[in-house]
Amino acid sequence: MATDLPLNPHPDRLLPAAEPVRSIARRLHQTVRDLPIISPHGHVDPGILADDTPFTDPTALFLQPDHYVTRLLHAGGVPLAGLGVGQGPLPEPQARAAWRLLCGNWRLLAGTPVRYWLEDVLTGVFGVTRQPSAATADDIYDQIAEQLSRDSHRPRALLDRFRIDFLATTDDPADTLAAHARLAADPGVTTRIVPTFRPDRYLEPARPDWATAVKELGAGDYRGYIAALEDRRRYFREHGAVSTDHSHADAVAEPLDPADAARIFDQALSGQATEAEATAFRRHMICEMARMSCDDGLVMTLHPAIHRNHHPPTLAEYGPDTGHDIPTTVEFTRALQPLLARYGTHPNLHLVLFTTDATVYSREIAPLAGFYPSVYAGAPWWFLDNPAAIRSYQQAVTEIAGFSRLSGFIDDTRAFCSIPARHDMARRLDAGHLADLVAAHRLDEDEAHDILTGLTTTQPTHVFKLAAEQEPRI
């Protein structure tokens, strides 16, 4: 088997295979290929950009922060310890050894979007022309490491090179947002970089750290707790935040009587709430988050039904977010009815529903988005951010709700350099879907161009309220 193959992504990758659809898709993609990136949800560390700290080595850049990569290698028998997971900065010999594990197991990524993104970054950002393998690992490592030492490959230079106009991070409500303040005050930073309010650990009394988290907010009773959350949301808005992010075991939103909520809060604070009471309180607080969004205008994003930390030994040794969060089934229609009955037509509410359960797109999310003006169908992400699932989503949602009810693409990544690769993948797939509609004489090409441009620019701008309120243009 050849061990030194060329790495040269095809210019028509992911476009439809057959003519004339491919030519239509190629023309459409060309019109949006170089448009700036809007990234309303992701997990890039704002401190990296505030400090403009050089990336130390290829392993720190590609492997350690990216559980998309490490979970696939782990499934193929590669130990997480060897990849540097959860270990912080690695000495050069250990970082190089981890990189060899990636390159030597390149076959494990075949056919996955992870490999697609990596190939795009390796060729487009670092000029790598040989496919990773055991034989090429050290040469590729040296090539990337040398470029990482240049000013051209520091985080801020790449931020400009990637044409990222807007970037949202994900932040704890108690965060000082000092990095964001420094970025906002720096005239050299032209990208709008904002925090996102992620309050999960403050809403779940069943978590072992809940009482400690609540005390960090300075809340001693239920009324003070609600006031503290509202105050932190104001603080985030003052630092540019446009949205909140929520991920719980289910999507149920069921309000409690305020007296019952206060009683459960007190019991939970003293460690006496039952599991059922803790769940009821969390479901009540999702309704409260929607109420607060109606008041302060923050967009509410919901992505439930992930079994977090599925493998306890891995959690104990390497910590959370290390590749063993696994999707479960989810239900939205009945779960969200109490919330939407109260707030679904409120002019200030934008509720973006994400899922890792592809079965609910046509059955629940698209019908909800096709009636409620507040509801948008979140783009496929995480386990669904792959070509097959994105194509299915395009058909399932737009046939029922239309293009105007889509969120626009969400990259949801910790891997900074993969942002442009992920967005280009989405633009290619959107171009292919629209080209099919043009070829079937359901759209003319000019209208398809307008829709594609809207999905890339005006739609996420509208959904995430990034500009003065405007009607979506698709």
Image (cartoon, rainbow, N blue to C red):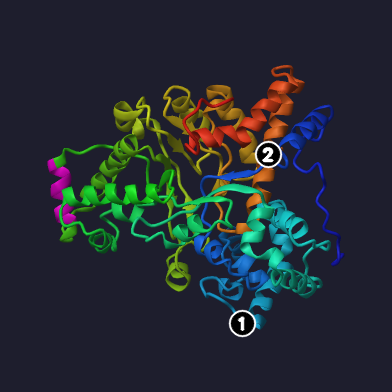
Tell me the element at label 1: loop
Q: Tell me which residue sits at (72%, 42%) in the image.
A: 34
State which region is magenta.
259-268
Residue found at the far top of this picture: 441
Q: Position of residue 114 (x, y in %)?
A: 66, 54
Vertical placement of residue 365 versus 8, above or below? above
Q: Position of residue 154 (x, y in %)?
A: 65, 65
Q: Is residue 110 left or right of residue 240?
A: right
Tell me the amino acid under the disc marked 1: Pro
Vertical placement of residue 210 versus 351, above or below? below
Tell me the amino acid under the disc marked 2: Arg
CA neighbours of label 1 inside 10 A, class few (<14), some (14 to 19), many (20+): few
- Closest to the observer, 468 or 245: 468
Q: Is residue 234 left or right of residue 26?
A: left
Residue 55, quarter of the rendered image? bottom right
The answer to whether one can see residue 335 in this image is yes
Tell me the element at label 2: helix
Label 1 sits on residue:
91
| Image disc number at residue 427 | 2
Q: Tell me which residue sits at (68%, 72%) in the image.
A: 99
- Closest to the observer, 316 or 444: 444
Tally of numbered discs: 2
Residue 408, quarter of the rendered image? top right
The answer to whether one can see residue 360 in this image is no
- Closest to the observer, 297 or 395: 297
Quadrant in which the C terminus appears: top right
Q: Tell me which residue sits at (26%, 58%) in the image.
A: 217
Whichever of labels 2 and 1 marks the residue nearer the N terminus, that label is 1
